[in-house]
Amino acid sequence: MAGRTCLVTGATNGIGYETALGLARAGAALVLVGRDAGRLRDAEARIRAALPEGRLEARQADLSSQAEIRRLAADVARSHDRLDVLVNNAGAIFDRREETVDGIERTWALDHLGYVLLTLELLDLLAASGRAGAAARIVNVASRAHERGHIDFDDIEGTRRYGAIRAYAQAKLGNVLFTYALARRLAGRPITVNALHPGVIRSGFARNTGGVLGFGWGLIRPFLSTPEAGAQTSLHLAVSPEVEGVSGRYFARCRAVPSSSESRDTGVQERVWALSLEQVGRG
């Protein structure tokens, strides 16, 4: 990865941090993105301590805010002449329904629309960096939870009925649908896009939850996989020559596997694509 630049969102802990560390070890120049300034400084310091010669920078942004996403993308485009890998990893689960500054339900806004808008804002920079035999890569961290998801076009933001798991599964299904729809639009261009399930990982993922959900997560947390293990499929899609030119696929444990039947429905993919673009002001 020497000479290549990679951007990782949600890079302050868990899978995102381990993905960023792995890319730095492979020789890439890194852009670390996180919402919390303190955690971002700590992540940057830990990577610098592990790799003193590494090239990295930290960018603070709340990716549930569309204005913040646009600011981040503009800053990256101004300061970099290339972007070879974009890892959309930032996400969370929320036990109560909340709305963002844009008036959108927070899970859908962060876990799905954040991927959509950041990708589209950086697409020109990615396209300028890719070439035949060395395509730029977009890596969307989804989840096996998408198999439980359903796109409720009549109540996509949970205004009538909200549940944390329901909202999260729907957003992760959105990631996979977006991946497939984008892959069709990128056909013939030097950019690939794939989605993945990282495994069920021991991280700070559910720190925004309380009650029964938070209690249950706390009980099972010691038995979950490590963030290092969870980052392996993200790293595989970001760096492996085995997936050069592979696009529009869903991976788990570093191999392509089938995603849910709803995720493979082209009609649903196109409806979510159109809705997502409308919600981020690009329709």
Image (tube, helix red, strand yellow):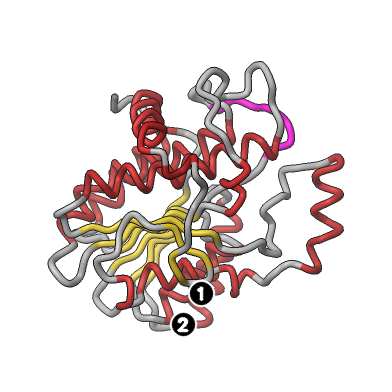
Q: What amino acid is labelled 2 in the image?
A: Leu
Q: Which residue: 37% across, 32% down?
A: 267
Q: Which residue: 51% across, 52% down?
A: 142
Range covered by the magenta-colored residues: 94-100
Task: Kindly identify which numbered label has been placed on residue 66.
Answer: none
Which residue in the protein does label 1 denote?
47
Q: Is residue 172 above or below residue 195?
A: above
Which residue in the protein does label 2 denote?
51
Q: Is residue 90 left or right of residue 199?
A: left
Q: Are marks 2 and 1 in contact (CB under 8 Å)?
A: yes
In this rendered view, identify the residue nearer to me: 66 or 116. Answer: 116
**Residue 95 within the segment the image draws in magenta:** yes
Image coordinates for residue 128, horizontal then vertical, percent: 15, 56
In this rendered view, identify the residue nearer to me: 12 or 252. Answer: 252
Image coordinates for residue 12, horizontal then vertical, percent: 56, 60
Q: Is residue 69 above or below residue 238?
A: above
